[in-house]
Amino acid sequence: MQLIKYLQAQGLGSRKTCQWLIDRGLVSINGQTAGHARAEIAPDSVHELRINGEAFTVVPRPYFYILLNKPAGYETSHKPRDYPSVFSLFPDHMRNIDMQAVGRLDADTTGVLLITNDGQFNHRLTSPKHKVAKRYRATLKHPADSSLCDTLCSGVLLHDDNETVAAAAAGLADEHTLILTITEGRYHQVKRMVAAAGNRVEQLHRLDFGGWQADHLPAGGWTFFTP
């Protein structure tokens, strides 16, 4: 891959901007100044990228996969309306790269959020036919007992819907804490299911998505991973 194309793929600017950086000797790859825009480099061999001495996050190519511990108060959108975008949690240059969240979390919902530029990976995890499990911890407004779990696993009719939706698993950590697993991704599904069962979600945290967990990361923390 030519150096100039690699820099563009890293979100460092237009072809003209990247050419300018190279011509002035401002680009360093693995500790070596890069002097030729058309020099061939192997993207997998790049472990350090500096521009004018400043270290930049190296984004894996051609595909990357990000595990984010989403904090509350962020929208899963490139064009947020009421809160900052989750994409604002990444370095500036990464926000120039095409990336999409795998599904969405509400602004007030926290926990596992996957982000990628791999469309097939995204589709595989979000397509209903694949039934990828998502496990949540819901803080309930009213105390609950096992009857709530039985109802959720048997199936509930969501408001403004015409078919029942059932949880894959449900259990109580305590009378105000529900652990719920679903294999679909409907709009506000967990909150709507709990409401249909006669309770209310006060706080929602996604513990697990398809086997990936993010509680080892601080809120707002993220890391690349290999699926």
Image (cartoon, grey):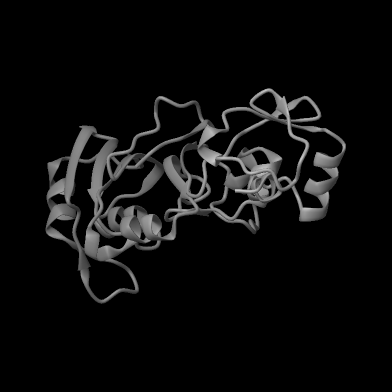
Q: Residue at x 57, y 50 (%)?
A: 75
Q: Residue at x 80, y 40 (%)?
A: 22
Q: Relative to residue 46, is residue 25 drawn left or right?
A: right
Q: Relative to residue 110, is residue 130 drawn left or right?
A: left
Q: Relative to residue 151, is residue 187 drawn left or right?
A: right
Is residue 72 at least partly visible in the picture? no
* Quarter where residue 202 is shown: top left
* Towards the viewer: 211 or 27: 27
> Where is residue 199 drawn, in percent x and y?
30, 50
* Towards the viewer: 147 or 40: 40
| Above or below: residue 213 compared with residue 190 | above
Q: Quadrant of the C terminus?
A: top left
| Above or below: residue 53 compared with residue 87 | above
> Where is residue 19 drawn, in percent x and y?
81, 48
> Where is residue 148 drawn, in percent x and y?
18, 48
Is residue 217 at least partly visible in the picture? yes
* Quarter where residue 155 is shown: bottom left
Count up the numbered dots. Answer: 0
* Towards the viewer: 150 or 217: 217
* Towards the viewer: 86 or 173: 86
> Where is residue 127 drawn, in percent x and y?
31, 63
Q: Residue furthest bottom?
A: 162
